[in-house]
């Protein structure tokens, strides 16, 4: 299944790509609600789930979540470099609760055997 995700993001049509990018947004928000995250860490986490995502795709997603008020950003020096950390805001956590409910409903319907 992981190879399907890799193929879908790079090969399939725009609609399929948009759906997978939405999955990635939810994934990012989920982890940011658990604790602060940073870009490279999330690229590796997403790779673990079969998503090959470039910084040029990831950072606009993070910035979009921030602009929507779902994430806050802080900066800290790590390994001699300035690193941006993202964490979920109260608005982001509330939105994630709603997303989870909709995902559960969708999964029940779409995966009904």
Image (cartoon, rainbow, N blue to C red):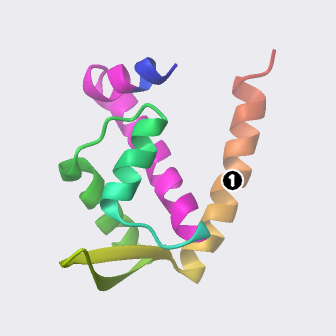
Q: Is residue 112 covered in magenta?
A: no
Front residue of 37/106: it is 37
Residue designated by label 1: 100
Q: Give the extent of the magenta segment.
A: 6-33
Q: Is residue 82 left or right of residue 18?
A: left
Front residue of 27/112: it is 27
**Residue 98 position in % (x across, y down):** 68, 61
| Quadrant of the rendered image containing residue 76 | bottom left
| Quadrant of the rendered image containing residue 21 | top left
Front residue of 71/112: it is 71
Image height of 3 relative to 78, above or below: above
Q: Is residue 38 left or right of residue 59?
A: right
Q: Residue at x 52, y 51 (%)?
A: 27
**Residue 51 position in % (x across, y down):** 39, 35
Furthest residue toward right: 113
Image height of 5 relative to 102, above or below: above
Front residue of 74/57: it is 74
Q: Which element is circle 1 on?
A: helix
**Residue 20 position in % (x across, y down):** 42, 36
Q: Is residue 19 covered in magenta?
A: yes
Q: Residue at x 39, y 28 (%)?
A: 16
**Quadrant containing the C terminus in the rendered view:** top right
């Amino acid at each position: 299944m992981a190879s399907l995700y890799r193929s879908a993001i790079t090969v399939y049509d725009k609609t399929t790509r948009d759906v997978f990018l939405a999955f990635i947004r939810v994934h990012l928000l989920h982890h940011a609600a658990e604790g602060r995250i940073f870009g490279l860490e999330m690229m590796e986490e997403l790779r673990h789930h079969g998503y090959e995502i470039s910084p040029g795709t990831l950072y606009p997603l993070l910035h979009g979540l921030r602009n929507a008020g779902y994430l806050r950003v802080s900066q800290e020096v790590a390994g001699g470099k300035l690193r941006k950390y993202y964490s979920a805001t109260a608005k982001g956590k509330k939105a994630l609760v709603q997303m989870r409910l909709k995902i559960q409903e969708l999964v029940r319907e779409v995966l009904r055997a």
